[in-house]
């Protein structure tokens, strides 16, 4: 079939991939990988491949896709070499229980008990299999016998169940995000999760880095949840294909191949033994332009999150491949309610929201590589409620009207005042190019309606500390970028009154949002889940515990000699066991 048919059916980007495949820029395996990386199921990718016809470059070593179909690689995998990856944020400690963020190194050091499949379903990773009872009250995970962690410590059902219970009870997000879970027990080589009620969200947290399978004995020996613990900094002990070697905040993280790795149970991971790569190094590069330059100069092999200003140049470079897909993420502004003189009334918060030209920021800062958010969810989410778009539209006249109705009056210098208080406050942002650009744009737009947000740029750790304080110890306002594969799971902990001061950085108490969260926790059917999700989004858009701004497209770039580095739409970060360097 012609490329015009492919473009009509699947869009211009897929048609271009097809044209590149036909011109032998890469083989079948790479073509299938690129299609699945942007969200196509294996079946859909096979249909597109069939439409392209044969390609004489499809000679080489036979391999299989996740569906079991035989395809051909461009050449045989090579063992050795270090993958050098650029990362746009500072690195987080490699402790799933006490970290406040998880980075791509978690995908190398750790496995989770289950993970996301290529179609957005759930598939095993560390577990050999899992099943859910008909009433939705029991989840059973089969734990392979004889498995050990990097240290050689036993990783059987008892160790896994103990760790998961600790995560549920004590982790940064565990308790609030898993209220419907009763707890974990063991029957032979099976871990049993019992539920208080049937809940659609039970498996979602288990797929994230916060539920990564660490050796619980090593974790406790290093200090456990003690703030002085060295777990995740000096040492980490997982079951993934790479071992923790170096963690240097502000600089890099380094992992090395675990030669004893027995292989993943994830069906689309084709290399079932030790990794091909000797090591992976993630370099912290917070300046956007520098990230692209280092990649182009050969100082990096792969890159997460280039500056969008550099994207077209990177796409035009025939030595590079750019992968983009929708991202479940968002930029939002916290508004600390313990500064009631600024953010205590809804009318003021709505006035601030109407002052923001979200589409203008998407166009100018993301170069169109994202979308506006008027409620908590990005439009890409399957449960997105479009009715939120009736809220928070850009309207300067309405912004000024709302602020005036709330009692704010312009002083002699144009800055708003109310009850003797100037509308002027400190505004914290992480030292990273895109976040700084967003924050500067927001501050300028607030100024247009008489509000002064004094920007303070700090490193990532300080930014988190500034948001996490009790009462007025926390910053009045801060920009927060969240990233999570299921938005509702993470946003409920940002908005729940149970999580003040962390991670409800706004210290917001909204009974209607709490009620929607309770509704979600009781959702045992898709219909109930959709209803709870819709209520949550609409209440958020109206009451504004945070000011939603926009989300961005996930963007990954790699040199063409990097093989099988294939981030896909359902996972935040690539997996690394199949990756090799053709150099």
Image (cartoon, grey):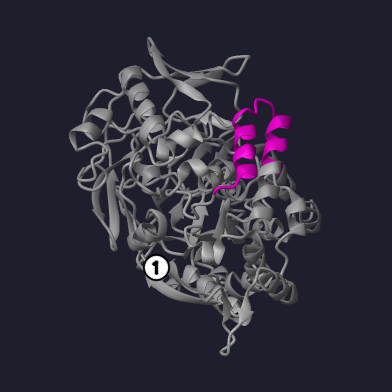
Task: Using a 10 Å C-alpha cutoff, classify the residue at mark 1 as few (fewer than 14 neighbours), some (14 to 19) or many (20 or more).
Answer: many
Across and down, in percent, residue 7 comes to: 77, 57
Taking the image as drawn, is residue 119 in sight? no
Taking the image as drawn, is residue 379 in sight? yes
Residues drawn in magenta: 509-534
In the image shown, does 8 or 531 lie closer to the viewer? Answer: 531
In the image shown, does 65 or 504 lie closer to the viewer? Answer: 504
Across and down, in percent, residue 191 comes to: 42, 18
Question: Is 511 situated above or below 122?
Answer: below
Residue that badge 1 annotates: 286
Across and down, in percent, residue 167 comes to: 38, 32
Q: Is residue 529 magenta?
A: yes
- Residue name at image x 46 percent, y 51 percent: 563
Give the residue at the far bottom of this rendering: 412
Across and down, in percent, residue 333 comes to: 54, 62
Is 92 displayed left or right of 291 in the figure?
left
Give the residue at the far front of this rendering: 419
Is 514 displayed left or right of 11 in the figure?
left
- Mostly what secondary structure, the magenta segment? helix
- Residue name at image x 23 percent, y 40 percent: 226
In the image shown, does 552 or 373 lie closer to the viewer? Answer: 373
Question: Is 287 situated above or below 120?
Answer: below
- Residue name at image x 22 percent, y 32 percent: 220
Is 363 displayed left or right of 95 in the figure?
right
Q: Secondary structure at mark 1?
A: loop
């Amino acid at each position: 079939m012609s490329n015009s048919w492919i473009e009509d059916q699947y869009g211009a980007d897929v048609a271009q991939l097809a044209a590149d495949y036909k011109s032998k820029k890469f083989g079948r395996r790479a073509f299938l990988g690129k299609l699945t990386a942007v969200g196509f199921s294996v079946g859909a990718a096979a249909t597109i491949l069939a439409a392209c016809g044969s390609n004489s470059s499809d000679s080489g070593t036979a391999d299989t896709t996740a569906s079991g179909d035989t395809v051909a690689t461009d050449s045989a995998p090579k063992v050795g070499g270090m993958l050098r990856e650029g990362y746009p944020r500072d690195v987080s400690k490699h402790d799933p229980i006490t970290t406040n963020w998880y980075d791509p190194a978690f995908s190398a050091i750790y496995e989770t008990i289950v993970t996301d499949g290529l179609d957005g379903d759930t598939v095993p990773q560390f577990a050999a299999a899992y099943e859910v009872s008909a009433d939705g009250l029991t989840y059973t995970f089969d734990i392979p016998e004889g498995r050990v962690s990097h240290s050689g410590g036993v990783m059987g059902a008892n160790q896994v169940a103990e760790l998961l219970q600790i995560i549920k009870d004590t982790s940064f997000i565990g308790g609030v995000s898993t209220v419907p879970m009763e707890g974990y027990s063991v029957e032979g080589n099976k871990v049993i999760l019992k539920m208080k009620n049937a809940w659609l969200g039970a498996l979602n947290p288990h797929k994230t880095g916060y539920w990564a399978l660490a050796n619980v004995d090593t974790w406790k020996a290093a200090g456990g949840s003690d703030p002085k613990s060295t777990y995740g900094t000096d040492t980490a002990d997982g079951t993934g294909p790479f071992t923790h070697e170096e963690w240097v905040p502000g600089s890099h993280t380094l992992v090395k191949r675990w030669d004893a790795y027995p292989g993943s149970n994830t069906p689309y991971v084709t290399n079932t033994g030790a990794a091909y790569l000797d090591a992976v190094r993630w370099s912290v590069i917070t300046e956007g332009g520098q990230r692209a330059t280092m990649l182009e100069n050969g100082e990096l092999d792969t890159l997460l999150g280039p500056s969008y200003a550099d994207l077209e140049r990177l796409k035009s470079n025939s030595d590079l491949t750019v992968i983009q897909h929708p991202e479940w993420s968002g930029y939002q502004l916290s508004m600390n309610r313990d500064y009631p003189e600024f953010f205590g009334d809804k009318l003021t918060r709505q006035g601030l929201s109407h002052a923001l030209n979200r589409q203008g920021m998407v166009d100018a800062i993301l170069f169109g590589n994202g979308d506006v958010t008027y409620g908590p969810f990005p439009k890409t989410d399957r449960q997105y409620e479009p009715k939120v778009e009736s809220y928070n539209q850009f309207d300067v006249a309405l912004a000024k009207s709302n602020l005036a109705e709330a009692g704010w009056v312009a002083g002699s210098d144009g800055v708003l005042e109310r009850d003797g208080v100037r509308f002027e406050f400190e505004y914290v942002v992480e030292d990273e190019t895109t976040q700084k650009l967003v924050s500067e744009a927001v501050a300028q737009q607030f100024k247009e309606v008489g509000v002064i947000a004094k920007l303070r740029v700090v490193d990532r750790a300080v930014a988190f500390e500034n948001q996490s304080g009790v009462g007025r110890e926390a910053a009045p306002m801060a920009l927060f970028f969240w990233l999570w594969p299921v938005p509702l799971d993470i946003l409920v902990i940002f908005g729940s009154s149970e999580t003040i001061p962390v991670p409800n950085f706004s210290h917001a108490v909204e009974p209607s949002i709490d009620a929607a969260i309770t509704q979600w926790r009781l959702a045992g059917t898709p219909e109930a889940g959709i209803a709870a999700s819709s209520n949550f989004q609409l209440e958020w858009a109206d009451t504004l515990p945070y000011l939603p701004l926009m989300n961005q497209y996930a963007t990954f770039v790699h040199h063409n000699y990097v093989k099988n580095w294939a981030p896909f739409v359902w996972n935040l970060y690539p997996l690394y066991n199949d990756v090799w360097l053709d150099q």
